[in-house]
Image (cartoon, rainbow, N blue to C red):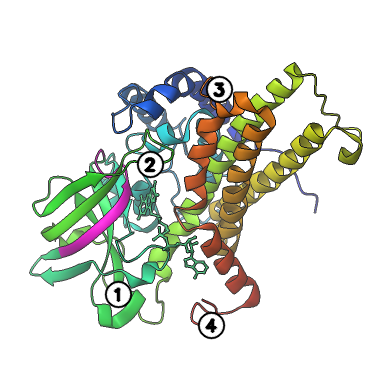
Amino acid sequence: MAINLDDPKKFRPLAGQAHQVAMNMLRPISRKYDRAEHEYPKELDMLAAMIDGLSESGAGEGAGAAGVRRDESDQDTGVKNGANLASVMSIQEMCWGDVGLLLSMPRQGLGNSAIASVADDEQLKRFEGVWAGMAITEPGTGSDSANIKTTATLDGDEYVLNGEKIYVTSGDRCDAVVVWATLDRSLGRAAIKSFVVPKGTPGMRVDRLEHKLGIKASDTATIIFEDCRVPKENLLGSPEVDVKQGFAGAMATFDNTRPLVAAMAVGCAKAALDLTRELLEQAGVVVDYDRPAVTQSAAAAKFLQMEADWEAAHLLMLQAAWMADNRKPNSLEASMAKAKAGRVGSDITLSCVELAGSVGYSETELLEKWARDSKILDIFEGTQQIQQLIVARRVLGLSSTALK
Ligand SMILES: Cc1cc2nc3c(=O)[nH]c(=O)nc-3n(C[C@H](O)[C@H](O)[C@H](O)COP(=O)(O)OP(=O)(O)OC[C@H]3O[C@@H](n4cnc5c(N)ncnc54)[C@H](O)[C@@H]3O)c2cc1C
């Protein structure tokens, strides 16, 4: 079977629109909100309203992070390019504009992906239009998310949540947070469930906002839960603790969100490559695609190597999203895409700073900002090392207990 390595034609208009938005609406305010950390980018309200309009008209399929549901009732067995591919392609373009601003888009939070992934139909309807952050990380628990200590105790018709969540992206600005908590610590990872907690629920409070290296347009919050009560219907998915299934339910969210984070890295790296190409051309460096890299200048050879790395990340991203669209298990591919794109994103953006020299390091261009912004994409939703661990486990057929 021939492999078509082009972007799917069906979504090129969507990607083109996203590119225009990134160029005309995100780039112009990129530096402003890099300097004004914690200030809400009010310009995004208009943009979010436009995306809502597109989604309602059906033209905005996958315009943001929320378009990642796997519809099990869809009996169409034909190969398809669906919402996951549309999402990665549009997110890539938006992050060509600005990663921090994309992460700040109302109603497009990572919590929305979690809802899209695991909510039942009733919950999906009830939480429609809600902007949801995602709260997994705790002071003692980062990569080891099975170790979560936040508790959820059933009391009558409500769950009572207690614990502390840190580094919640959009945690201050969002309407609700999807909180991972354990129903019973003695039952291990199978007892971890996610709960939608609307902002303003008594017992929930934002404690502080973080100052960060990059993505300064995006707010990152610590949230405390003290006897915080939510209706029991806010538990996403099944309340049963299935020890055999273990962590699979909660982890399924990552199969959908990791390709999206890969797309962010691919988009940010493309921004750096495009600008560096222009700067190299201005400096008289010619990148010749018909000659071996080793026969060209060091700068041109480096550029060719970065483009090859970028293409590999881009293809892995498309593959992981395409598999999700076609309801194929994609945990391995989602982690491969995230590992490759996360690393390539950081390497390329920093190497572009290096190639552009003082112009790369100064604030006259956005290269230094992209080098700072891209680093987080190799950290959140599972670090580089954790993605490699997951890939190794899958390839070698080893359990998480056998390979730590
Ligand atoms: C800006 C920002 C936004 C974030 N947004 C969110 C969010 O919205 N929601 C959320 O829940 N969390 C969020 N996070 C948290 C993020 O997901 C965690 O920081 C990440 O999972 C890593 O956890 P940690 O920081 O505790 O590092 P640790 O887990 O302590 O890891 C430290 C280092 O050790 C390595 N390491 C850990 N375990 C292993 C292992 N078994 N083998 C090899 N190496 C290992 C890691 O790769 C890393 O290099 C955010 C973080 C930041 C900085």
Is residue 133 left or right of 143 when viewed as pictured? left
Question: Residue 170 in magenta?
Answer: yes
Quadrant of residue 203 within the rendered picture: bottom left
Q: Which residues are magenta?
A: 161-173
Residue under label 2: 212
Residue under label 1: 191
Residue under label 3: 365
Mark 4 close to ligand 1, CB under 8 Å? no
Mark earlier in primary sequence (3, 4): 3
Mark 2 close to ligand 1, CB under 8 Å? yes
Quadrant of residue 278 within the rendered picture: top right
Mark earlier in primary sequence (4, 2): 2
Residue under label 4: 402
Mark earlier in primary sequence (1, 4): 1
Mark 1 crowdedness (10 Å alpha carbons): few <14, some 14-19, many ≥20:
many
Amino acid beneath label 4: Ala
Q: Is residue 107 visible?
A: yes
Residue 149, given in percent of the width and then of the height, sits at: 26, 70
Relative depth, front residue between 366 and 43: 366
Residue 279, given in percent of the width and then of the height, sits at: 69, 21
Q: What secondary structure do most residues of the magenta stretch adopt?
A: strand
Q: Quadrant of the N terminus?
A: bottom right
Q: Residue at x 58, y 79 (%)?
A: 398
| Alpha carbons under labels 4 and 2: distance apart | 35 Å
Residue 230, given in percent of the width and then of the height, sits at: 14, 58
| Alpha carbons under labels 3 and 4: distance apart | 47 Å
Mark earlier in primary sequence (2, 3): 2
